[in-house]
Image (spheres, rainbow, N blue to C red):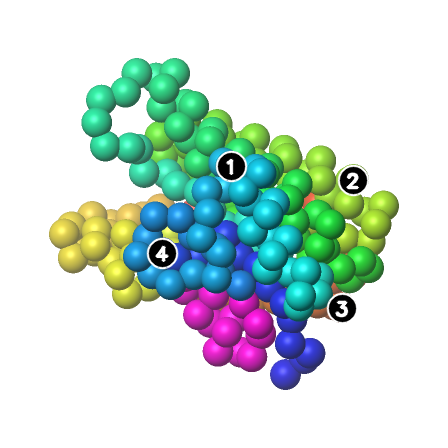
Amino acid sequence: MAEAKNILISGSSRGLGREISRILTSLGHKVWTMGLSSPAEVDIRCDLLNLDLLKNEIHNCFDAIGPIDILICNAGTGKPPAGSYNSSELERYFLEKNLLTSQNLLFAAEPYLRSPGCSVIGISSIAALTDNSGAPEGYVKAKRLVNDLFAHKALLFAEIGVRVNIISPGNVFFEGSRWDEIRKEKPEFVKELLSERVPLHEFISPIEIVDAILFLSSKSATNITGTNLVIDGGQIL
């Protein structure tokens, strides 16, 4: 394989982030995981909304081993919090969990981005690209602002040779994922979704996301920055 990379990925103690980090590790890369409340083991456990703590944790992690080759901003959620909240409270919740987590991580990690050749990848969602995703309004708004943030950073980071791109997945399926749960709970709904709303009639797999990350971070993509790579089986068409 190509040279092993130092990779930092947020939101990697569960869900898609955990799957991505597992696959990247199996490919021989050195993956540094980040998480907050999940009991799964991570290398950096801190609150991405606490910028001072985040900066300190990243400094401690990378001061000894060198700079970051690939930064993956994966932390985020489309799941509303438990309890009763008004629309403005929900909007703030989704902005904090999706936009501010990426914004803070980009700021804290910037001194450790290896230039030139470093790659920054934001994990967004097709919800930001269509009005028919069914996702919560606050989540859609937050992901659209995430896309704007990464486009802006692509322009700024180009001056130091760092490329910034976004991957927008559709419905990602793996064992233990939310779509795994839904397929068990509502098999007919899932069958209808794939048949009628996804032209290629398939779920997206985590390895497809990993392949996209590695391509966008490779020498084959040295002139690709500021792009949004959609992996959704044609769902937003």
Residue under label 3, please give it: 219
| Amino acid, disc 2 | Leu
Q: Which mark is residue 156?
A: 2
Dot 1 crowding, Cα within 10 Å, few <14, some 14–19, many 20+: few
Dot 4 crowding, Cα within 10 Å, few <14, some 14–19, many 20+: some
The part of the image, by quadrant, that contains residue 223 is bottom right
Dot 3 crowding, Cα within 10 Å, few <14, some 14–19, many 20+: few
Secondary structure state at the residue bearing disc 2: helix
In the figure, is residue 183 to the left or right of 156?
left
On the question of residue 122 being in view, the answer is no
Q: CA distance from mark 3 to mark 4?
A: 29 Å
Lower position in the chain sequence, tag 3 or tag 4: 4
Secondary structure state at the residue bearing disc 1: loop
| Amino acid, disc 4 | Gly
Q: Which residues are magenta?
A: 17-31
Please report contact status of discs 2 and 1: CB closer than 8 Å, yes or no. Answer: no
Q: CA distance from mark 4 to mark 2?
A: 31 Å
The part of the image, by quadrant, that contains residue 147 is top right
Q: CA distance from mark 2 to mark 1?
A: 24 Å
In the image, residue 116 sits, relative to residue 155, either above or below, namely below
In the figure, is residue 38 to the left or right of 58?
left
Residue under label 4, please give it: 15
Of residues 202 and 121, which is closer to you in this image? 121
Q: Which mark is residue 50?
A: 1
Lower position in the chain sequence, tag 4 or tag 2: 4
Secondary structure state at the residue bearing disc 3: helix
| Amino acid, disc 1 | Asn
